[in-house]
C-alpha cells in the first residue's frame, strides 16, 4: 500500500529533522508519496502569508501530515502558524508521549506515560480584554458584582477561561480510546476543580461520565498542583493523563523534561478529519543548517504517525533501532552527551545514518 502524506518541512532546523524522519520511514520499507508543502517565515515573500491555503487543502485531502517546526513570524498578524493549523483543522487532541530510553541522561528510569492535552478551549481561546481597554459594560458590572474591588478594569487585564461539555467529552473519550488501543491501564484527569468549580469542575464531571463507558480502564481524578509534584517524585505511577489546554501545555513540557528534554519529545495533533504529527520542539533558528540538532524527536514523531496509519510493525522496528542507537551512545548528537562540547558528538545526518544502519541490522537478524 502507498500512503499519501502531506510533508511540511517547516523552517529553521525543520527541513533537517523532517528529512531525517523521511529517510528513516522509507528505510523501514513503508511506501509513502509525500505531498510537500511549504509554510513558515521563508515563504512569506512568495505567498504573502506564512500559511498558504494549499497547505491546509493538502492536509484536508490527505488527512495525515508530518510537519517540521515553524518559526512564529513577528508582526504579521499571525499569532502562530502552528496554532492556526490546529485551529483551522480542529485538531483538538494533542498527544505527547514521554518515555525513558536507556542512555538518555535523565533523573528517572522506567517512565512511560502519555499526556493528552485539549487543544482548542480554556485560556487559549483568545478571549482577552486588555488593561484599560474597551470593556463591555456587562463585563465591568460582572466584576464589580463579584465583589472583587481590586479588579479595577483600568488597571487589570482579563483572560476568559472557558471549558465546554462538548470539548471535554471528546478529549476525554479520545484519552480512553487511546488507552484502550495502546494497551494502557489508567487514565488520570487533571484540573484545579477545587477552586475553578464551573470550568474545571465541569471537566471532572463530564470525564466521570465518560469513564463509565470504559470499565476496563481505571479512572482517577487529581488536582494539578499535587499531580505535578507527584510527577516529579514518582512519574512511573502515571499512565495516560488528560488535561485542559493550559495545564496540558505545562504538563507536556514537564514530562519531556523528565525523560531527557526536547531532543526526544515527539507529538501529534489529532482531530476527526485529520492528524498533524510534529515534534514538541521548535525551529531552533540558531542551529539552522548546521547539521547539529537531534533528529530523535522528529523520528519518534514519524513512529507515532506510522502507528496512526496502522503500520505498527515498521513503527516498532524504528523505535527499537532508535533506542539501540541511543543506548550505545556512540552516534548521538551533542545534547545526548554528558558535555555539550563533547567532540565525539555526531551531526543530525550521522545519527540518522546510524539509526538506518541499525534498522537494516534488525531486519537482517529477523
Ligand atoms: P526551540 O524548541 O526551537 O529551541 C529551544 C532550544 O531547545 C534550542 O535552542 C536548543 O537548545 C534546544 N532544541 C530544540 N530542538 C532541539 C533538537 N531537535 N535537538 C537538540 N536541541 C534542541 O524553542 P524556541 O527557541 O522557544 O522557539 C524557536 C521558534 O520555534 C519560535 O519562533 C517558536 O514560536 C517556534 N516553535 C514552533 C513550534 C512548532 O512548530 N510546533 C513549537 C515550539 C516553538
Image (tube, rainbow, N blue to C red):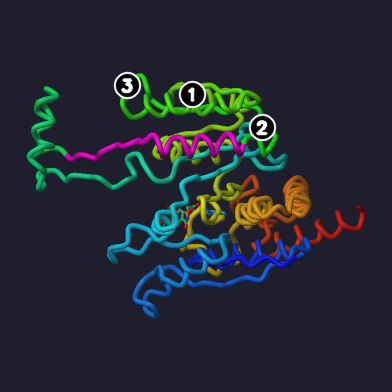
Q: Whole-percent x and y of residue 89?
A: 45, 57
- Identify the residue shown where x is 37% and y is 24%: 201
What mark, if any, has residue 184 been given in the picture?
A: 2
Mark 2 C-beta closer than 8 Å to ligand 1: no
Residue 167 lies in magenta, yes or no?
A: yes
Farthest bottom residue? Answer: 46
Residue 349 lies in magenta, yes or no?
A: no
What mark, if any, has residue 72 been given in the picture?
A: none
Examine the residues drawn in magenta and state their main secondary structure.
Answer: helix
Q: Which residues are magenta?
A: 157-178
Mark 2 vs mark 1, foreground winner is 1
Residue 346 relative to residue 128: left or right: right
Residue 246 to residue 337: above or below: above
- Identify the residue shown where x is 39% and y is 46%: 120
Label located before the other in sequence (3 or 2): 2
Say which residue label 1 marks. 208
Say which residue label 3 marks. 195
Distance of mark 3 from mark 2, alpha carbons? 30 Å
Amino acid at each position: 500500500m502507498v500512503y499519501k502524506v502531506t510533508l511540511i518541512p517547516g523552517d529553521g532546523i525543520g527541513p533537517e529533522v523532517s528529512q531525517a524522519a523521511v529517510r528513516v520511514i522509507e528505510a523501514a520499507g513503508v511506501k509513502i508519496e509525500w505531498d510537500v508543502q511549504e509554510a513558515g517565515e521563508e515563504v512569506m515573500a512568495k505567498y504573502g502569508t506564512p500559511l498558504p491555503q494549499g497547505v491546509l487543502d493538502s492536509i484536508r485531502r490527505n488527512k495525515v501530515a508530518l510537519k517540521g517546526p515553524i518559526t512564529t513570524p513577528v508582526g504579521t498578524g499571525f499569532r502562530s502558524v502552528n496554532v492556526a493549523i490546529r485551529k483551522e483543522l480542529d485538531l483538538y487532541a494533542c498527544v505527547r508521549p514521554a518515555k525513558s530510553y536507556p542512555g538518555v541522561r535523565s533523573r528517572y528510569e522506567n517512565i512511560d506515560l502519555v499526556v493528552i492535552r485539549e487543544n482548542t478551549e480554556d485560556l487559549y481561546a483568545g478571549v482577552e480584554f486588555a488593561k484599560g481597554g474597551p470593556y463591555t459594560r456587562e463585563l465591568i458590572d460582572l466584576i464589580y458584582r463579584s465583589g472583587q474591588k481590586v479588579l479595577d478594569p483600568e488597571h487589570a487585564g482579563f483572560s476568559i477561561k472557558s471549558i465546554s461539555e462538548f470539548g471535554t467529552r471528546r478529549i476525554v473519550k479520545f484519552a480512553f480510546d487511546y488507552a484502550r488501543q495502546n494497551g494502557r491501564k489508567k487514565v488520570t484527569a487533571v484540573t484545579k476543580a477545587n477552586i475553578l468549580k464551573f470550568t474545571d469542575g465541569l471537566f471532572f464531571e463530564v470525564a466521570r461520565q465518560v469513564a463509565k463507558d470504559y470499565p476496563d480502564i481505571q479512572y482517577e481524578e487529581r488536582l494539578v498542583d499535587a499531580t505535578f509534584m507527584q510527577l516529579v517524585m514518582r512519574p512511573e505511577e502515571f499512565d495516560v493523563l488528560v488535561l485542559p489546554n493550559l495545564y496540558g501545555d505545562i504538563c507536556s513540557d514537564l514530562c519531556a523534561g523528565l525523560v531527557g528534554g526536547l531532543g526526544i519529545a515527539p507529538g501529534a495533533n489529532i482531530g476527526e478529519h485529520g492528524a498533524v504529527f510534529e515534534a514538541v520542539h521548535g525551529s531552533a533558528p540558531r542551529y539552522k543548517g548546521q547539521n547539529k540538532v537531534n533528529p530523535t524527536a522528529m523520528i519518534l514523531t514519524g513512529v507515532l504517525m506510522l502507528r496512526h496509519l496502522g503500520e505498527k510493525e515498521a513503527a516498532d522496528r524504528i523505535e527499537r533501532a532508535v533506542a539501540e542507537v541511543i543506548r550505545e551512545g556512540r552516534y548521538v548528537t551533542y545534547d545526548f552527551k554528558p558535555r555539550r562540547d563533547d567532540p565525539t558528538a555526531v551531526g543530525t545526518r550521522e545519527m540518522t545514518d546510524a539509526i538506518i544502519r541499525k534498522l537494516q541490522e534488525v531486519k537482517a537478524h529477523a
